[in-house]
Image (spheres, rainbow, N blue to C red):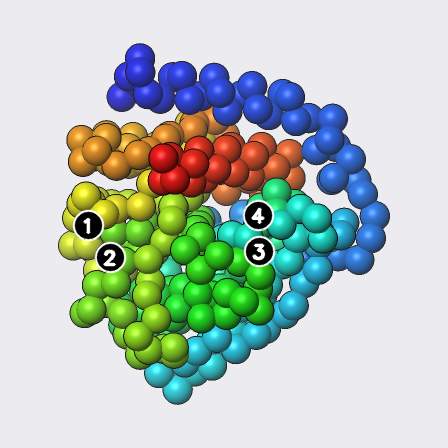
Amino acid sequence: MRSRSGVTRRRFLGAAAITAAAPALDVFAQGRGQGTQGQRGQGPGGQAPAGPPVPLEGVTLEKDVVFGKGGAMDLRLDVYKPRAGTEKRAATIHLHGGGFTGGSKDTLNERILPFAKHGYVAIASQYRLLGQSPWPGMLEDVKAAIRWTRANAARLNIDPARIIIVGYSAGGFLALTAAGTQNKADMEGRGGNPGVGTGVEACAAFYPAVDGGPPSSVSPATYINANYAPTVIFHGVADTTIPIESSQRLFQRLRDGKVPAELHTFEGAEHVFDRDPSLASACGSLADLFITRQHAKSKT
């Protein structure tokens, strides 16, 4: 489906943003400095493996902070703090892909850094995989990460009302589901900071698994309602791991449900297309624009 009012126009906007950003992106990709592990190529389940160090360029990194429990397991996250003077006082929580059975928060660096460079406190969060816990254990871990972020708003220098959930592939499924089940008592779990809310200001989903989650009967579209968080979706037209049609259908469901939504598609791009730092940076700029616009609307 390529509607005149939706998909095609947003493809044009995405391409324009990539072109405009290209010179700065080359500098970012080639810059020097202390780095962490990024990702190159594509591994099993659509998960990009770790690669060469990526320069932080003023972003500070705090690794392996324990944010809660998943059963008996300590759950950990990494906090990327923006350079002083660029802070938006908002946080993005990022969820890796891997087909629900693999992957790691340590593979997200290149995709997280553009958000930190836009002034967000960007958090890469662990969640239990299938085999470590049945569904909805991984969603409960995502809720625990949201609660920890809100409970630690002062430490992170963020507004506790400004938490955005971001997911990639299987993590996109979790982000979209969290966006539709905010403060839903039977999905909150007991991972830490009980009683703290799990509301999110917005959701960004990259090539999300929509049709066929951990239990195949569950879809994020099931939870579309009046309180669903504003959502921006990114998907490659040439994706054969998760066909673009699933995101197009989800976009239409969001529109039908009156949920503020955008769909940005990328001609010729495959699954995990944002392993390319230039595309990751362009998507970060588009996500920032969407989040900023939705925040401004909420204040009017």
Q: Where is residue 277 in the image (x, y as percent from the top left)?
A: 64, 39
Category of crowding for the residue at label 2, using alpha-carbon neighbours closer than 10 angstroms: few (below 14), some (14–19), many (at least 20): many
Up/down of 136 relative to 4, above or below: below
User: CB atoms at circles 3 and 4 under 8 Å apart?
Assistant: no
Q: Which of the two labelled residues, at mark 3 and mark 2, occupies the earlier sequence position?
A: 3
Tag 2 secondary structure: loop
Q: Label 3, on which residue?
A: 121
Residue under pointer 1: 223
User: For the residue marked with disc 4, what is the amino acid?
Assistant: Lys
Q: Considering the numbered disc 4 on the image, is that residue within a helix, a strand or a loop?
A: loop
The label number, if any, that marks residue 88 in the structure image: 4
Give the label on residue 7, or none. none
Query: How far apart in space, not on screen, are marks 3 and 4 (Cα)?
Result: 8 Å
What is the C-alpha distance between the residues marked 4 and 2? 25 Å
Judging depth in this view, the residue of 172 and 201 nearest the camera is 201
Lower position in the chain sequence, tag 4 or tag 2:
4
Q: What element carries label 3?
A: strand
Residue 33, x across and y down, in percent? 82, 53
Q: Residue 69, percent across and down? A: 41, 80
CB under 8 Å between discs 1 and 4 = no
